[in-house]
Image (tube, rainbow, N blue to C red):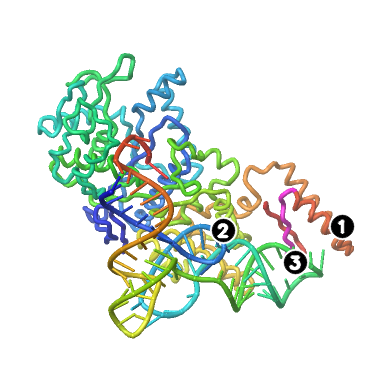
Amino acid sequence: MLKIYNTLTRKKELFQPRVAGKVGMYVCGMTVYDYCHIGHARVMVVFDTAARYFRYQGYELTYVRNITDIDDKIIQRAIENGEDYGKLTERFIDAMHEDERALAVLPPDLEPRATQSIDAIIAMIKTLVDKKLAYVGGNGDVFYAVTKFKDYGRLSGKNLGDLQAGERVDVDMAKRNPMDFVLWKMAKPNEPAWDSPWGLGRPGWHIECSAMSTCCLGNHFDIHGGGMDLQFPHHENEIAQSEGATGERFVNVWMHNGFVRVDDEKMSKSLGNFFTVREVLKQYQPEIIRVFILSSHYRSPLNYAGESLNDAKAALTRLYTALRGIETATNAVTEDAYKIRFEQAMNDDFNTPVALSVLFDLARDLNKAKKTDQQQARTLASTLKYLGGLLGTLQDDPEAFLKGSGEIESGKENIDQQIQARIEAKKSKDWGLADKIRNDLKEQGVILEDSPDGTTSWRRD
RNA sequence: GGCUGCGUAGCAAAAUGGUUAUGCAGUGGCCUGCAAAGCCAUCUACGGCGGUUCGAUUCCGCCCGCAGCCUCCA
């Protein structure tokens, strides 16, 4: 029985789909004006893992993750670059999809874009204006009147009184209440704009998610996810908009993932302490990043450091080393004991660190079986690969992972030659030469491993 | 200031009212020409002070420290 921590109730709850056997999940995606960093990668990997698990559990899942392709930052970046904003967003959408594929993140079922959802956005704003939940401000922008929504602040545990006491809020005189937020923003000259009942302009950030999620999944759906920082005000505002407009409950379960940190500080664009996915990929194989992300629970902070990536690499190396040289069959019988433990972990609010620990126990068993019982070894290896697959890992050929992908062929040939030379040296008991070859290769980052049968295999350090 | 959440061994990271997490690193052993890998054994814990309890790292209170949100941010 799957339990999920619901931000709304601050408790783990038994997951009960609105419609038996079906799940609708919406996740706030990227604003595409720059490359994805590791924090974005975490959202992608975390919810991809959840999506995979829902499907594994037999649910018919509709997974929606939007793209914010119009907002202030995009416009600003386009101006800085002297680039058409549409060209800019296309570029970064492509880059995002590339990163996603690298991290074995399966595409969501629907990926709506703000600029392609303008009609739905305008319709929702219109409803809100008609219901007097929204008004046109002094500057022509349309605002949501937060005081008209009784539950405002419930998700983030805030109340309007406390918020208004905050002094850092820039009071916009066009608003009636400082906490009111913009639904439709009037265009300045030469800005991208769409026609609306309130004039040429563009949607505010919060409304697009309300419009796109209800469009794709209906007024009321199961799960809404995103980073912790979106809890307030973004998700709070979404609730106000959607429930205000439809009069129905919006979302049953709110899931928020924790941040990636650098030196105990949030990794973010504004702090400038971020590492892009493509940057990290130059140094580490993509699967290492994925395992790094899954090695901590999705709600916990995840500290980014070279050391942590190295840990993930070592962990993954152990698993692939266990799988090395064993035939795995896709339809093979799986070891139920491990499968059960794995599922128990995942059922407990997607506890991937525990799920991974099950894989390590399995690997130990597999290593033992390799020496004694080949049939059992195959079963365990198949189970390991199968369970790993549920986390989106261990699907590579073990040799390919251990030898490093994108290896230069000539490099490989050279290594093979050296290994041959060393085998000859060993045959003539020239240990000095044999050790020299091994050390030379080690300095090139190649580690040799002799088998009892006289053959030698290698892997990258 | 208000509201969330966190504080676990050398590092990372989980669970749990009494019994092995797990990965890396360390130590001893097996294996090996020697290594590596693997296997076996093993050492390092639960921020501080009180309370509840037969018993608390685990529940409660207070304190200290840290982070996040309250402003665009995954």
Query: Share a chain, discs 3 and 2?
Result: yes
- Spatial distance from mark 1 to mark 3, Cα to Cα? 20 Å
Amino acid of disc 3: Asp
Q: Quadrant of residue A205?
A: top left
* Residues rendered magenta in the picture: A444-452
- The residue that disc 2 covers is A315
User: Which x, y percent locates residue A299?
Assistant: 38, 54
- Count residues near mark 1 (Cα–Cα under 10 Å), then give few for <14, some for 14-19, many for 20+: some
Per the rendering, the mark at residue A433 is: 1
Q: For marks 1 and 3, give the one nearer the viewer.
A: 1
Callout 1: helix, strand or loop?
Answer: helix
Per the rendering, the mark at residue A316 is: none
- Count residues near mark 2 (Cα–Cα under 10 Å), then give few for <14, some for 14-19, many for 20+: some
Q: Is residue A93 left or right of residue A207?
A: right
Q: Is residue A449 magenta?
A: yes
Q: Counting residues from the N terminus, which is met first, the one under dot 1 or under dot 3?
A: 1
Amino acid of disc 1: Leu
